[in-house]
Amino acid sequence: MILFLRDQNNNTIVDLECWVKTAEDNKDYKYIELSVTVDIFYYSVFLLTNPDKQSEIIRDFSDIQELRGWLWEVYFNGQRSDPDKYADVLAKLREMLKTVANKYDLSYVED
């Protein structure tokens, strides 16, 4: 599943992909993986056009950029990544991104 945050011109600021991955060396081992990209150009434009919220934006988007760390260090808290938790992980990611989208009047999109 790919989750996006987009500006009013439909430019993608955040591209987050979450999926169940199979280990290359062990086809029986599956785990949840996460990749986040914050597009530096559109993020910068968004940041510069919101001077009164810049500190909040920097903090919130830094947290988004670190969601892979959240998955492993907070959600699974050092335990084995369980693919059966995929729906719950996805629900939490959706909630986090929708909160940021609502806060800054961005579009939340799924693909």
Image (cartoon, rainbow, N blue to C red):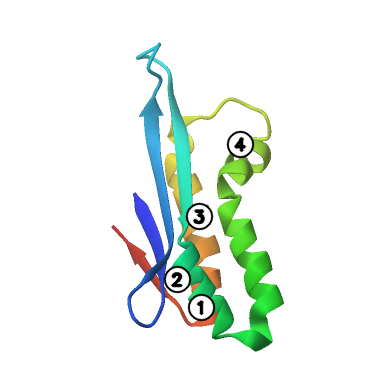
Residue under label 3, please give it. Answer: 93
Q: Compared with residue 109, is residue 23 higher up or lower down, i.e. above or below? A: above
Q: Secondary structure at mark 1?
A: helix
Residue under label 1, please give it. Answer: 46
Q: CA distance from mark 3 to mark 2?
A: 21 Å
Q: Is residue 103 visible?
A: no
Q: Secondary structure at mark 2?
A: helix
Q: Which mark is residue 72?
A: 4
Measured from the top left, where is residue 69 in percent x and y?
62, 42
Q: CA distance from mark 3 to mark 1?
A: 21 Å
- Residue visible at 58% across and 85% down in the picture: 50
Q: Secondary structure at mark 4?
A: helix
Measured from the top left, where is residue 105 in percent x and y?
48, 82
Q: Quadrant of residue 96?
A: bottom right
Residue under label 2, please give it. Answer: 42
- Badge 2 amino acid: Tyr
